[in-house]
Image (spheres, rainbow, N blue to C red):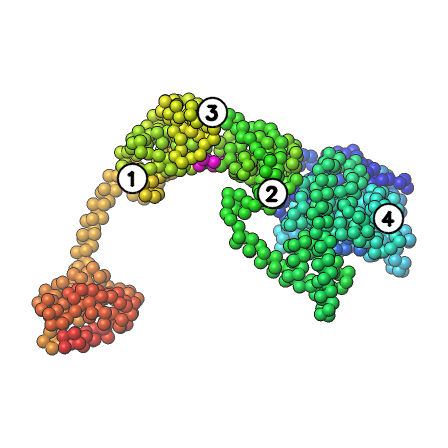
Amino acid sequence: MQYRGVNELRRLYLDFFESKGHLKMKSFSLVPHNDNSLLIINSGMAPLKPYFTGQEIPPRRRVTTCQKCIRTGDIENVGKTARHGTFFEMLGNFSFGDYFKDEAIHWSWEFLTETVGLDPDRLYPSIYQDDDEAFNIWNKEIGIAPERIFRFGKEDNFWEHGAGPCGPCSEIYYDRGEKYGCGKPGCTVGCDCDRYMEVWNNVFSQFNNDGHGNYTDLIQKNIDTGMGLERLAVVVQDVDSIFDVDTLQALRNKVCEMAGVKYKEDEKQDVSIRVITDHIRSVTFMVSDGIMPSNEGRGYVLRRLLRRAARHGRLLGIEGKFLSKLCETVIEGSKDGYPELEEKRTFITKVISEEEDKFNKTIDQGLSILNDMEAELASKGENVLSGADAFKLYDTYGFPIDLTKEILEEKNITIDEAGFNAAMEEQRVKARNARKVTNYMGADATVYDKIDPAITSAFVGYDKLTNESEITVLTTEEEVVDALSEGDKGTVIVDETVFYATMGGQEGDKGVIKTSEGEFAVETTIKLKGGKIGHVGTMTKGMMKVGDTATMEVSPAYRADTCKNHSATHLLQKALRTVLGDHVEQKGSYVDPDRLRFDFTHFQSMTKEEIAKVEDIVNEKIAEAIPVVTDVMTIEEAKKTGAMALFGEKYGEKVRVVAMGDFSKEFCGGTHVANTANIRLFKIVSEAGVAAGVRRIEALTDKGVMKYYAELEKTIEEAAKAAKAEPVQLVKKIAAMNDEIKSLMSENEKLKAELANNALGDTAGDIKEVNGVKYIATKVDGVDMNELRNLGDKLKGEIGSGVVVIVSAQGADKVSVIAMATDDVIAKGAHAGNLIKALAPIVGGGGGGRPNMAQAGGKNPAGIDELIAKVPDTILAQIG
């Protein structure tokens, strides 16, 4: 079999499938696009998921790729064995509802035996145990004897990953010979030893798993083939492991040369050699895709790998920085398949070099502290490092927890991980509570303090909405960085921008920033110290780097609507001065695309007529289509034109003056319409006081007015529908309904009085006497307090002289009580208010009132009879 290098095998594979009608696509970025289920791309099919599920239409129904992948599930084992690695290349051929098992199996066999030249007698296919269709293709069409086709269960030969497309697999194993075997009698395909190596995996994606183990047939059956390029190279080059194939061997040899050691002389050294060889590949490719070192997410994976490699370099005795030099070897070995490595060579080496510097500054101190911690544990006879100590190493010295774990593991010491996580959470809570809220996405804006003060930005967007400029600074929410990649939140600063930053009451622009490799959605634009303009938002696609040329694009609709509202505030201020007087001064304003707010000095609320007059003036000026002219001039020149300055504002030597004919002239740095006609409509929606002598108007323009009237119209329609009238008849209908309500209320009151009287019945026999004072104490059902008062007045008239107490239960938990006394018995000491205070607790309530009339409420109707029985004693206690 002919020797073939990694780069040649990659080329052969892609060319082979291109000859079979496949579209050859470049590797996707390691940063997943619109996929929150993954941190980093970990398989050839991962970036193609939308094509498999049908969410997106593929560029062709047959596709082939060589995809860069990173798997971090077993970082701890990388280096300890020659089998484990984090970075690998996955060769793939994919069918989206086109060819299926027959072609997939035939082509895999053809490529391996004819194109690569593997011995057919050393290849063994495996199938899913129930997949007779695949068995028949291998047996009857390819001609493989039944005993050489292995049936495996779901665990081995059924591909699925949670919910989504899944299906049976057919793998192909290569017999590497006895020298790689375990020597056991039953050694065959599926043995754990290194003799039979799986080189190809055909996944027949024919089912959909709903995530609960329920399978349905896919309408579109797909093929997802995966083959590890490095594994194929191991077989073709007949070498021990992936670390011995040509490209990795060159890298491994470079590590040995830097360290002055040889591979396979010392197992401990070999572990470090393999760690560095693997990790520098991952790190180089991650940085090339815009992943930057940080303390969370993808950035943390990168930092972890880089620092692990740096430490193993020290274990090998490599002095100083070496990873930034070593990544040059990665670039040389892989640029054939990934030209972006060469294009970004300077950027990659710079990022890795800076991260190495950061780690080198702290590692010696950190290792020394860790040694002290180890010694203290030894003196106590303990072997568990506390979570607080592990956190101190992480927080102060930048040791990822995994690195501390690995170092201690070599000495049989473990870490209290629960304690570490608790310390981590405590710090997060403290940081959250200590943050000062700013307009930088609610976070503490200290990241901006780290920017070089010499950097500044120029705003060039008064008369255009797009421009090109160089990116000078990028930040995440925590650090100044060299690049941002998909999903990162942060800030972009450029030399010149068309984005207006939030200033003078005008909200900053929104839009998009594009480079050749990425897109950034600008959610707001802010003014920073030193004249810098920060575009705050999220990377939505790809990556961008410092030094890239960026195309700046402001959202035209956002800017246009903001301009309309801003120009309207100028017309509004002049209209207010015209209607209310020259004492009107601007006290503040706010404009965004949806509305405008204007605060001004005035000492009373505006009348409806004044508001209407102001509104009319502004709309007249809009209708006059006055050109809006801006000029830059000295303050003195500006004052001579009669332009109004904002009271208390500090201005530089030169100011912008915005003039709308002779009607309005103001100092203003904001953006405006070109002509007042662009504002189209103006409507004041509220006028209110906000402070002593300060009023606030909220108003709308153009689309905002139309929306306001549309909502008003909808409300009127709903009201008319509820009133069962046409909208034009609504006022008349409401007036008629009001008259009807009044009439019904009057009738209702009469009926209630009648019912109350009926409930009361004949009370002549209820008049009793205590110590010469007459009284009536009675109960009625279902009478409210209002009617109780009427009944009380009636009984007081009937009794002539004395005390009246009436109690009514309304439902199961409401009681009303009323008490009245005539003037002559009040003179004897009777007091309705005190009477109520004494009686109300019996029905679970309270109340009081004047000597002649008092009332109470309660919650316990069961106490009514007891209350009535207590009335004579209570009166007696008052009159003695």
**Residue that label 1 marks:** 603
Q: Magenta span has 508?
A: yes
**Residue that label 2 marks:** 450
Q: Magenta span has 855?
A: no
Q: Earlier in the sequence, mark 4 or mark 1?
A: 4
Q: Earlier in the sequence, mark 2 or mark 3?
A: 2
Q: Which residues are magenta?
A: 503-509
Asked whether the viewer can see residue 461, the reply is: yes
Q: Residues within 10 Å of mark 3 (few under 14, many from 20)?
A: some
Indicate left or right for 146 with 602 as reference. Answer: right
Q: Is residue 272 above or below residue 596?
A: below
The three-letter amino acid code for the residue at tag 3 is: Val
Indicate left or right for 766 with 17 as reference. Answer: left
Secondary structure found at label 2: helix
Q: Residue at x 22, y 61 (%)?
A: 785
Q: Measure how far apart labels 1 and 2 are at the Cα level.
A: 47 Å
